[in-house]
Image (cartoon, grey):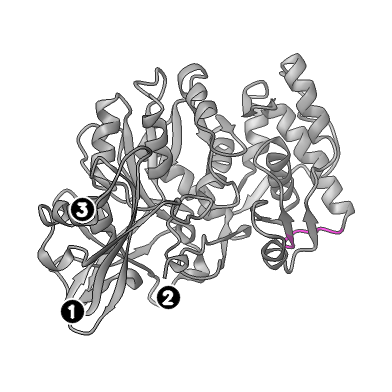
Amino acid sequence: MVVEGWLARAAAARPRHEAVQTPAGAWSYAELYAAARRGSGELAARGARPGERVAIALSPGLAFAQALHACFLLGAVAVPIDVRSPPRERALLAEGAVVALDEPLAGAESASRKTEGEGGNGSTATAGGGTPGREHDLDAVAVVIHTSGTTSAPRPVELSYGNLLWSALGSAVALGLDPRERWLCAMPVAHVGGLSILVRSAIYATTAVVHERFEVDRVLDALREQQTTLVSLVATTLAALLDAGLTAPPSLRCALTGGGPVPASLVERARSQGVGVGLTYGLTEACSQVTTTPAASLADDGDAAGPPLFCTRLRIEEQAPAQAGVGEILLAGPTLARASLERDGWLRTGDVGSIDELGRLHVSGRKSDTIISGGENVAPAEVEAVLEAHPDVLEAAVLPGRDERWGEAVTAIVVARPGRVLDGEALRAHCALALAPYKVPKEVTLAAAPLPRTPSGKLLRRELR
């Protein structure tokens, strides 16, 4: 199926509306479309063709947005690469690309300076060269995103224009859509959570507010002073904002929080400070969101990650021995990368969870992370949530330790909040109040340094083992 190109459509419908805002400047849809057309012409001159890969190793900002949409207009496949990755890893991720961008395409910086100084709302949608990009084939590959590699090396996932479009539609149904939407992205755009904000905003013809990195003061200012309506966070960045005094942002409809377990205590704290938190569960193969707390349920959805998007099918595959109703999360639907599906049409996520009586998903953790102690299954995320609910604990990681009697023993690594002192036995006693005895850590190690995480905030367990 072929649909109208979304950037061309947005530029025609709202040429003067702000498409991308960054601390360095902003572009209207007319300007973004013109810059993308110039960029697509440059990519073509450098040898890129429809269906061929273009590696984009650029920081989040106007130049990245131009390069991404230039690929879409040309029909080339965009391969975003995190500029913070070491050179060897960047080279590996760029393998197979006919063009590798590590400098902005022509016109990116001059347009940024113009916009910063003059406001930049003129209609220039027909300026520049290159392919107009009036249509998208929904079956064609649009981007290749590499998984975050929390337990193994990053793996490429091909996402089609159809995957991106259905994800945007499903998200809009769950969260609602305001034509004045300003969605703040302070996440890596090389991963699906950040990239999808840029893509969705173009599909909606709304504004993506893009920061190069998460900086507490800059994000606080955007939430308090810049009419931000949506923001995507992970548990650690949400906690940092609350610690910095974030309360009742005036325009914020929802702080969409996911990327890993989000402690119930953190959600309660955010809501008590006037920050509406919508929990979400997603993965690269599903083009980001799988389940999302609906806008109407932000105040009362507890710690559930919400029901599936309207276009996503979800079921739980129980496996013995297991707790009734708990098992591996399986997914199907038009947001799923086709190559990730098995012959029966389902994606086996490797994540473990359950569905409650209201159809909401509760995620327990990774199947591969499950600790089997004395024949009992322990989900590390459950124990980590209890540890992180302690007022003196900043973050925690739970891992299996060798144990001659139990096979595997639950062990924990914890980091104290600044200025706090932790005691291992006191933490074990804290866990015993909320957990079954076999889930209480047999050993607690106190760490001074922050726990290793991916750029998108997920815990890197493989570096702790």
Magenta span: predominant SS is: loop
Q: CA distance from mark 2 to mark 1?
A: 22 Å
Residue highlighted by disc 1: 320
Q: Quadrant of the N terminus?
A: bottom right
x and y, in percent, of residue 367 in the image: 32, 70
Tag in front: 2 or 1: 1
Secondary element at image label 2: loop
- Residue 427: assigned label: 3
Q: Is residue 213 above or below residue 409?
A: above
Residue 124 at least partly seen: no
Which stretch appears magenta?
47-53
In the image, 82 versus 334, the foreground residue is 82
Q: Residue at x 54, y 54 (%)?
A: 162
Q: CA distance from mark 2 to mark 3?
A: 43 Å
- N-terminal-most mark, 2 or 1: 1
The numbered mark, 1 or 3, whose residue comes first in the sequence reads: 1
Q: Residue at x 54, y 45 (%)?
A: 194
Instruction: Check residue 51 for magenta coloring.
Output: yes
